Amino acid sequence: MTNHEDAAETPQAACYAVIFTSLRSRKYEEQDNGYEETARRMLALASRQPGFLSVESARDKDGFGITVSYWRDLDAIKAWRKNIEHREAQRLGRAQWYEFYNVRICKVEKEYGFSADKL
């Protein structure tokens, strides 16, 4: 993320965050193997999923990444997890793209921020 405009827009009311942390596999780092295309497809697909609110993501030069997606409720998250194309992307992630990943689901109860250009 390079500036505050890249930050996700979340609603004022409580929502849920799915925090996906991962490390890209060094073995497949040199070759894309469909990773970028699948990532774009998953973002497009998730954004049409009922209950999806927004997403923000970053990956460092060593391949460590964090993606946080925001959802209206736990049922929306469960439905996304079961999506057939998403399940295939998960399988490919385990087989080819990641050394590891973790998923954490949290309830967002409050949000606040700062922006120097708003002073």
Image: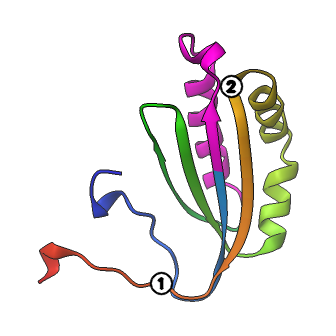
Residues in magenta, as a range: 21-50
Give the percent coordinates (x, y) of residue 15: 65, 79
Q: Quadrant of residue 60?
A: top left
Q: Residue at x 50, y 74 (%)?
A: 10
Q: Amino acid at mark 1?
A: Glu
Label 1 crowding class (10 Å Cα cut-off): few <14, some 14-19, many 20+? few
Q: Amino acid at mark 2?
A: Trp
Q: CA distance from mark 2 to mark 1?
A: 32 Å
Q: Residue 29: within the magenta?
A: yes
Give the percent coordinates (x, y) of residue 110: 53, 88
Can you tell which mark lies on residue 111?
1
Q: Quadrant of the C terminus?
A: bottom left
Can you tell which mark lies on residue 41?
none
To which residue does mark 2 refer? 97
Q: Residue 48: within the magenta?
A: yes
Q: Is residue 39 left or right of residue 72?
A: left
